[in-house]
Amino acid sequence: MKYDMDIIGLKLAQLQFDTIVASDVEDKKEANLNFEITLELKEYDDGVYPVSWELSLELESLFYIKAKYDMYITYDGNQNFLDKEIIMNKVSYPILAEFSHLTSTLTKEMGAVPLIINIQELMERGNIEQK
């Protein structure tokens, strides 16, 4: 089973970035970092599949980022179905790298020190197997 991705075709389809005003937040000593990643597959033609990745990151009391990336993958396996978990484990690295870079850029534009989250931490928080 082999999955190949079209990195050149990777595009940011949607972006939401909200800063959280201090008066909207309860007094907290520690801000929690929440991260989620999901993917949606649609069947296309000749083993090519459009994949939409939705990622969200919230640093409570500071900001919320939600991004949707679109890309294509090809699949040349024996099974006639795609396994989302396998795709997540094998193909997510470049998407996580893009999202990490986006996060640091947006937080820098807030006037703060850029938040740099390494890809391994995103993988752990997203329950993605590290290969």
Image: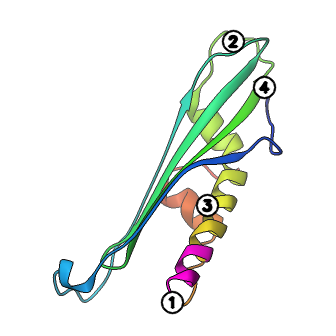
The residue wearing badge 3 is 99
Q: Amino acid at mark 4?
A: Thr
Residue drawn at x 69%, y 16% is 44
Q: Does label 1 or label 4 sit earlier along the sequence?
A: 4
**Sequence-wise, which precedes: disc 1 or disc 3?**
3
Q: Main secondary structure of the magenta part?
A: helix
Q: Closer to the camera: disc 3 or disc 2?
A: 3
Disc 3 residue type? Phe
Q: Residue at x 30, y 85 (%)?
A: 30
Q: How many marks?
A: 4
Is residue 78 found left or right of 117 in the rendered image? right
Quadrant (top left, top right, bottom left, bottom right) of the N terminus: top right
User: Is residue 63 among what the camera can see?
Assistant: yes
Seen in the picture, residue 36 relative to 114 is either above or below; the reply is above
Label 3 sits on a secondary structure element that is helix
- Cα–Cα span, label 2 and label 1: 48 Å
Residue highlighted by disc 1: 112
Q: Which residue is pictured at 80% across the width and 45% down the height?
A: 7
The quarter of the picture where residue 118 lies is bottom right
The secondary structure type at the circle numbered 4 is: strand
Q: CA distance from mark 1 to mark 4?
A: 40 Å
Dot label at residue 74? 4
Give the mark, 3 or 2, whose residue is nearer the N terminus: 2
SS for tag 2? Answer: loop
Q: Is 62 positioned to the left or the right of 15 in the image?
A: left
Q: Nearer the viewer, residue 110 or 77?
A: 110
Q: Which residues are magenta?
A: 105-111
Q: Mark 2 highlights which residue? A: 79
